[in-house]
Every structure is written in C-alpha cells, then in structure tokens.
Image (cartoon, coloured by chain):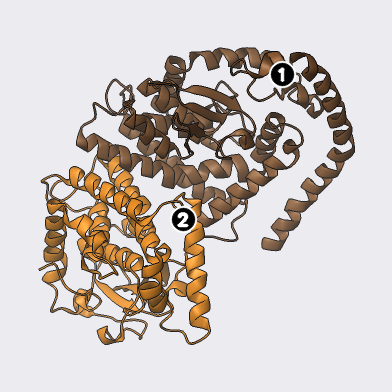
Chain colours: A orange, B brown
Amino acid sequence: MTLMLSVPLTLSNFSCYSPVCIDSSHFIMSLAAEAFVSQIAEDQILLSDCASSLAVQAYLRMCNLPVQVSYRPNAEYMSPSGKVPFVHVGNQVVSELGPIVQFTKAKGHSLSDGLDDVQRAEMKAYMELVNNMLLTAELYIQWCDDNTAAEISRPRYSSPYSWPLNHILAYQKQWEVRRKMTAVGWAGKNLEQVYEDVSQCCQALSQRLGTQPYFFNKQPTELDALVFGHLFTILTTRLTSDELSEKVKSYSNLLAFCRRIEQSYFEDSQAGSSSRGYSKGPSLF
Amino acid sequence: MAVPSELYCWEGDWGLPSVNTECLIVLAYAKFSGAPLKIHKIGNPWRSPTGSLPALKTSENSSLSRPSEIIIHLRKQKYNADFDLSAKEGADTLAFISLLEEKLMPALVYTLWIDPKNYVETRRWHAKHAPFPLNFFLPGRMQRQQLERLRLIRGDQELAAGEEVERELYRDALECMNLLSQRLGSNKFFFGDSPSSLDAFVFGYLVPILKMKLPNGKLQQHIKSLDNLSHYCSNILALYFPSDRREDSSHKVSSQPEGCDSDHEPRVTRPPFSRSPVTLLPRGRGGRGGALRIGRRIQLIFKAALLPLFQILKLTLPQKLLRMTG
C-alpha cells in the first residue's frame, strides 16, 4: 500500500492525475493502504503550503512509509479541512501534520515513542512554535506584503483558473488571510517585525537543537520533520527579496540540520519512484 | 524612573486580580519583575487609552495593548523576570507560549463566550461591570468579536456552539494542560525557584479556568484533577496577589444576594476609577451623589421598559442565527 499525499503539483512530475499510483516495491505490510500526499500543482503552490507538504513528506519518509505525491490544482477543495496537504490511504483521507501523525500512530508507526513525558511536552510545544510563528510569518509575507502578493502569490494561486475566477479567488484568499492576521494580532505588524519574529523563532530552534543531530538526540521525531519542511522550503524558495532566507541562513546548525535530513531521507531515493513528488527547486548543495 | 506607567485592566472577581487572561498575564509579569505600575481596574474598555484592555500608558505617553509588547516595554525599563534564564530556557519559553496560544486559547474563548450556558454567566458579569448604557450592548459586541476571532483562527466560517466543535477544542485544551503538568512536574515554577514570563503566561491562561465559576466546567474539572497545576496557580495567587484573595471573601458576602437579581446591578457598578487615586473623588462627591441618584432612576426606568424586550431578542436571535448557519 502506498500513501497518497495530495499537494498542488506540476504536470512534469508525475503520472499524478491518476488517482492511485501503486508501487509494489514500496509495499508496506503494516499499513494496508496506498498513501498519496496531495498538494497543489507546482506552479500554483505557495511557500506556506509547500512547507507543510514537505513536512508531511519528510515525516512519512522518516516513518519509512512509501509515499506517492500527487499534485492537484484543486487539492485545497479536496482536503477535509480545506488545508493541504492531505493523505489518502485506502478509503481514508486525513489532512495536516497533526492528524496525520495520529493516524500513522494508530497504524503502528510512531517516531516519538522513545520520548519521556517532559520531552514529549517540549516536542509539542516546539511544534506549536513553528506553527505559530514560522507558518504565520509565511502567510503574512505571502499575502500581506503587497509586493509579494502582487508578484508571486496572486498569480500563482490563481494560475489554474480563468478570468474572472482567477481574480475573485485570489482576492478572496488574500482577504481571508488578512482577516486571520487581525485575529491573531499580526495585522499591526510591518514586514520588519515579521522578519524579526522569524529570526527569534529560528534562534529558539537553533538554541534547542544545539549540536545534536536531531531535536531529541539521535532519532528524528515529527518535530524534526516539521522544522525541516519549513526551513528547507524557506531556504530554497525565491521570493521578491532574500531577507527571509537570509534570516535562516545565519544559523549554521539549522542549515546543517536541513542538509542532514535532505541527505538521509530524500537524496538516496532520488532515483526511486518515491522521489517523484520531490522537486522543490535547488537543493542545498 | 519618573512617573510609573499606568496599566488599565479588567476588574477582578472570583478571587482573581482580573477576569481577563491578557490582563492577568501583564499583572503577573509586573509582580514577578517588580515593575511599579499604577493599576486601574475598570469594567469599561472604552476608558482605556487604546480602547481595549489591557492597556499600558507609558511615561512617554504612548500606549500599548498586546501583553507581549507590554512585557517587552517593561523589560526595556530593566524590569526583567527572565534575567536568569539560559538561552535554551528562553527558547522553551517561546515554545510553550506558542503552545498556550495555539491549543488553550481557542478553548478558553469558547468556554467563556461561545458555550451557551457559560455565556449567560459571562454576559451577566460584563453587563454588571460596564456602566449604563454600555451594559446593554457591550457584552453582545464582545461576544460577536470573540466568535469572529475563533472562526478566523480555526478557519471555519460556520463555526458555532456545538458538541463537535467543543469536543475538538477541549481535546486540544486538555492535552495542552496535560503537557504543561508533565513539564512542570514537581517544580515550584517552570524554570526553578523564581517565576519568569512563561509563568505569567501559564498563570494567565490557567487561573481563570481554575477559579471562575461557570455552569459548564469541563475544563475546570480537568485542571482540578491535575494537582500540580492547580497548586501552582493557587500558589502564585497566594504569593503575589494576597489582597485579591481577601477581596474575594468580602465580595462574596456582600454580593451574594445580588447575584441572582439583575435589578440590583447598579449597586455593583462602581464608578470607574473608584479604586484609583484621589482626583475624581473630592470634587465629585456632593454633586455626583444627586446626579447618580437621578441617573440611576433613569437607568431603572429604562431597564424596566427595555429589559424584557432585550431578553426576548436575546432568546430568539441566537437560535435563529444558529438555524440559519446550521
């Protein structure tokens, strides 16, 4: 069985418009279904969705589950929570990292079983830190910075639609994100303050990581997958300015951390079919 | 330090220095760091310099509203409760604050403002503490704002009170409390023997859950079952806010008979600033008494006429709305 992850994807990458890709070489006994990670099409996907999708992919790979990534322009509308990515296993559809982690746990795959209570509490807290600060900052930069919104986010987001739907949907999305920023108290911030927050968050992650290979010693956990997903995407995505990736680049242990995960979980299978969905621009090397 | 900054925050009740989480965070941080603040406890957010509570009016005459901004401001003035923390502890602080904001805050908003049974209580409290005529619409307005906020945070425009939403939000909240309890263990504070800004945040989120008496007390039951967390909160209350505890007992005696009878509301509606300095009192005394009596009479007439109408509207409107969205 394979897990299907739905993310908006590009056409060049796959056979992905067919709903199920079965790869017998990746058959896993304990999980009796194909998992597909679905995301939005690659020329459509935005930084924040890309980061969340990569985090889920990294997590599934760390669990040693076969992943088939499938890019759909309407992935957002297919997802039960309206957010990408989602996995499609057998007849079950689960979206977002938290529920996916619980789902795989129920199937007997867990990365955090070795942690004690305090470590588990800290792991969850740091995961919320990433969601609370990095993800919100990504959304802010995408939709609330007028330059980025006009040059990157709106054109990409609306690329599958024709006039006038493209304008309507893009502005609707932008409006929704802006109201969310008001609700979480970010509306009053300017771009500088947002970069400052990203920097603060990276500093916290960097402090926590220290010189360890992973956040909790030698074994990766879902926190590692989440941090990798966001930092790697920030590092490899070109935006209107480099400032965001520069903030991350100033923490050398985080860079090394991203490289390490890329090498151990993405590089070696490059030739294999499971890397099909992995095409996020330049690698760190 | 010239003049101390002035802090405006919601009044307290149930033995709490304030009923609002964000106000509690700032109050606790000020106590922990020893910052001298002139505190105005009010029931009318329109009195605050920013129009919302809490608000800090600094000596440079600017005003701040978000707890994190206020804490940064105090830190800049050398009132720093996090001085002894290591870099890693600083990182943990940030992480656990995020955990509270993501997991506990939505459930807290839900339990105070959206849960229909509890909202009756919340509305009554705010109506009691807001001055006439704001008491008629301020609570409803606040509820709409909170509902909107919850909808945007959850990304669900149709969100309304209901079992499923409650179950999801409370599951996150209970998990969050368990994690905090595990992290705290048998420590006195989160990082050793002295309180830091993380303690202010945890206290601000948990103590209202622990102390407020609300009809639907699922969150309260859970926190009471976590001994170390409930001790931790009571301990901070006893150590840093001893006066509010006493106030609570006297308040209970005097307000008990009024609790159930809404016609007695005005007596509890103290004029704003009543606990704060001098300036207003002497000049006002003579004339104000008369004005107050006339004002109160008008208020009572209004209430007699309008209250039934309001009640009918209140009863019918939400249900209609529910039906529409559901």
Q: How many marks?
A: 2
- Give the letter of the chain under mark 1: B
Q: Is residue A106 visible?
A: no
Q: Is residue A223 above or below residue A145?
A: above
Q: Residue B275 sits in which quadrant?
A: top right
Q: Is residue B286 above or below residue B52?
A: above
- Give the letter of the chain under mark 2: A
Query: Percent x, y for residue A276?
Result: 22, 79
Query: Percent x, y for residue A173?
Result: 48, 69
Eye-nearest disc, 2 or 1: 2
Q: Residue B32 sits in which quadrant?
A: top left
Residue at the location (27% across, 24% down)?
B192
Amino acid type assigned to the residue bearing label 2 in the image: Met
Neighbours of disc 1 within 10 Å: few (<14), some (14-19), many (20+): few
Query: Percent x, y for residue A102?
Result: 36, 55
Q: Is residue B49 visible?
A: yes
Amino acid type assigned to the residue bearing label 1 in the image: Gln
Q: Quadrant of the C terminus of chain B?
A: bottom right
Q: Quadrant of the N terminus of chain B?
A: top left
Residue at the location (38% across, 78% down)?
A156
Return the residue nearer the eye: A112 or A98. Answer: A98
Q: Which residue is mark 2?
A: A181
Provide the secondary structure element on which disc 1 rests: loop
> Relative to residue B16, is residue A117 drawn left or right?
left
Q: Is residue B104 above or below residue A62?
A: above
Return the residue nearer the eye: B100 or B292. Answer: B292
Residue at the location (46% across, 42% down)?
B104
Q: Which residue is mark 1?
A: B256
> Relative to residue B270, is residue B8 drawn left or right?
left
Q: Are marks 2 and 1 on the same chain?
A: no
Query: Percent x, y for residue A22?
Result: 28, 80
Provide the secondary structure element on which disc 2 rests: helix
